[in-house]
Image: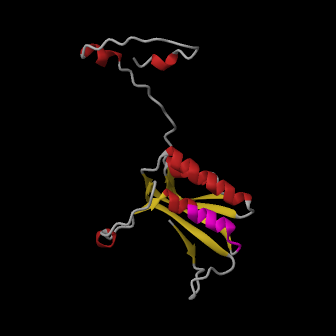
Amino acid sequence: AGTVASSVGGNGEIEENSILFLDLNGTIEERAQENPFASLMNNDFNSYGLDEIIDAIKEAKSNKDIKGIYLQAGAVEGASGASLEEIRGELASFKESGKFVVAYGDQYSQELYYLATIADKVILNPQGSIAWHGLASTPVFYKDLLEKVGVEMQIFKVGTYKSAVEPF
C-alpha cells in the first residue's frame, strides 16, 4: 500500500526528505492477503489491507525522515465508507504533525476524491475527470412483500422514535 519513493538506500534505511508514496489502485480489504497468483495475472490491480495502509501512515508520521505523503489516486474498489473515513482520519492525524499530503489522479472516483480532500493540494490531470454522483440513500419497504407471503406484522412502539418501523 505504501512505499517510500526513491529514498531507500542500499542498507534499507530511509533517507532524509523522503516521501511516502501511497498508491491506491486496487481493492481495500480489512486485512491484507497474499495472492500467490498475482505475478501470473500480470495486472496492476492490487489488494491492500486497511491495516497496512493505516500502519504505513502511522509509521510515516513518526519517522522524522519522511516529510510528506504522495497519494496516487487510481481505481479503488470495495472500500467501504468506514474504511475511507479511517484512512482519511489517519491522514488528518499525519498532517497535524506538520507534514504535507499531496494527491494526484488521472481520474477521481467519488470515494477517492473524498479521500483526497484531506490533502494540502489535490491535482487532477488536465485530461482527467472526476466521477461525482452525489450521496444517496433509498429506504427499503417490506410491507407489500410481507402481505404477499402472508405475514402480518404486529408493531409495538415504545418511546418517541416512531419511524423505525416504517419499512414494515
Q: What colouring style does the render use?
A: secondary structure
Give the number of marks. Answer: 0
Residue 114 shows in this picture? no
Q: Residue at x 71, y 64 (%)?
A: 99
| Residue 159 drawn above or below residue 101 | above
Q: Left of 41 or right of it: where is 27?
A: right
Foreground of the two, 6 or 158: 158
Q: Left of 124 or right of it: where is 141?
A: left
Q: Residue at x 29, y 14 (%)?
A: 151
Q: Give the residues drawn in magenta, as a range.
A: 55-64
Q: Residue at x 62, y 55 (%)?
A: 90
Residue 102, image quadrant: bottom right
Q: Position of residue 5 (x, y in %)?
A: 57, 75
Q: Position of residue 136 (x, y in %)?
A: 49, 33
Residue 87, image quadrant: bottom right
Q: Position of residue 59 (x, y in %)?
A: 62, 67
Magenta span main SS = helix
Residue 61 drawn in magenta: yes
Q: Left of 92 or right of it: where is 51?
A: left
Residue 151 drawn in magenta: no
| Residue 117 drawn above or below residue 102 | above
Q: Residue at x 52, y 52 (%)?
A: 112
Residue 38 shows in this picture? yes
Q: Residue furthest bottom?
A: 10
Q: Position of residue 149 (x, y in %)?
A: 24, 17
Q: Residue furthest left?
A: 149
Image quadrant containing the C terminus: top left
